[in-house]
Amino acid sequence: MALPATTPNVRVVTLTIDGRDLSAREDETIIEVCRENQIPIPSLCYLDGLSIWGGCRLCVVELEGQGRLFAACSTRVAEGMRIQTNTEKLQRYRRVIIELLFAERNHVCSVCVSNGHCELQWHAQKCGVDHVSVPYRQAAYPVDSSHEMFRMDHNRCILCTRCVRVCDEIEGAHTKDVMGRGSDCQIITDLAAPWGDSDTCTSCGKCVQVCPTGALVKQGTSAGEMVKDQHFLPILARRRHAQ
Amino acid sequence: MSTTNKITVATTWLDGCSGCHMSFLDMDERLIELAQKIDIVYSPLVDAKELPEQVDVGILEGSISSDDDLEKAKAFRQHCKLLISLGDCAVNGNVPAMRNQFKLSDVMDRAYRENVTLQPQIPNREVPALLKTVKPIHGEVRVDVFIPGCPPSADAIWHVLNELIEGRVPDPSSVTRFGA
């Protein structure tokens, strides 16, 4: 669901977020208004510039008078809306969501190439997840290293689909997509072929840049790949002496 | 030189690298200040050979990977009023738990048969049997405080211990995280 382009004659609505009186264009979503007003809402699948997915549910908020929670990224503001973004209930729900993400695949932060640069790790700390209370699934997922420049480690994937959307909507290649359901759900390249065999991938690397975790990385970034090449040295040295 | 008003602390390492204990020692001169307030009654860092009947605070590093780890974790839970999981291995299984994706017999073969050049054999005497699944401490016994990190920094350990000493509920996430 792509957001429509802004039109000049759009109406303005007033609403309150965490008790603050705010105004916003009626075509904005709750998360956009929060971001504009420096109200922090954690999110993983949402990324400014991409279409809305609404899959991670980390950005859930409470709307007064409504019995259920709403994803701030996929809910438009409305006149008189009263929104709570950080109640105890929401904090608890967000912690559970993050715990389930950690339990589902293999996020071993200490040995991950994205350690210290990972949005999942960062949100876990910010939301106070200091342990995972559900049992880990311990299922092994494949790693696709067939691409010359990039690598996909499905163990670290949280299925936010940012890579799928950036490839389709921004690069226009639509190399990546989603296959399977439940625990079998996986990001695929082309029709589930090795990434290196893809003839649609332009090797632009946008997917790597938008990936919130260590699932998509550049080749050569792990410690074991730091191979030095010193072949240039004797060649250059000989040529200089020959001059 | 234990005095009655000091908080008694016991520590041990299970399946880990002892790095969290090293991080504990990295508190450097603050250890002297800490020693005024706590008494370490059982630990790889001191000479005591037996866990006392009643201890105020137990600190466990490492995950539960063997019979022996499980026994120690249960003993700590039984004898310690408050139990702390120190470091990622204790908190989430971390590197030791990465073997969970493989069959235990394959792991043993890899370590003791495939990669050895002299007398390949599976050790079965005087070493504890490995469990099928590596678990974090709270996968087996109730844990009160979690300090993630690989290892948690000396500052993080200092902060959490101080909060406990002062009678406050510590917020480890304010000072450390998974993989820190």
Image (cartoon, coloured by chain):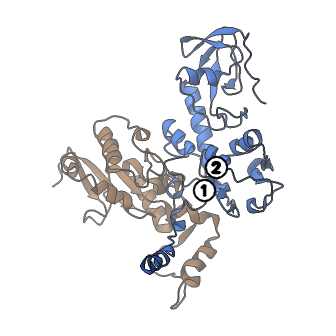
Q: Which residue is mark 2?
A: A208
User: Label 1 marks which chain's residue?
Assistant: A
- Looking at the image, which is closer to me, A193 or A150? A150
- Most extreme residue toward the bottom is B119
Q: Which chain is brown?
A: B
Three-letter residue code for mark 1: Lys
Q: Colour of chain A?
A: blue
When asked about the image quadrant of residue B48, the answer is bottom left
Q: Chain of mark 2?
A: A
**Residue type, mark 2 in image:** Val
Residue with the most extreme right position = A191
Q: Residues within 10 Å of mark 2 (few under 14, many from 20)?
A: many
Same chain for mark 1 and mark 2? The answer is yes
Q: x and y percent of residue A119 in the render?
A: 56, 42
What is the x, y in percent for residue A130?
48, 43
Q: Residue at x 44, y 40 (%)?
A: B173
Q: Which residue does the image show at 57% across and 25% down from the upper left? A: A35
Counting labels gives 2
Q: Is residue A97 above or below residue A147?
A: above
A23 to B114, vertically: above or below: above
Give me the residue at 64% from left, 64% from top: B101
Q: Are marks 1 and 2 in contact (CB under 8 Å)?
A: yes
Q: Nearer the viewer, residue A46 or B9?
A: A46
Q: Eyeballing the image, is A139 above or below A239?
A: above
> Quick check: can you spot residue A85?
no
Q: Which residue is the site of mark 1?
A: A218
Tag 2 or tag 1, which sits nearer the N-term? 2
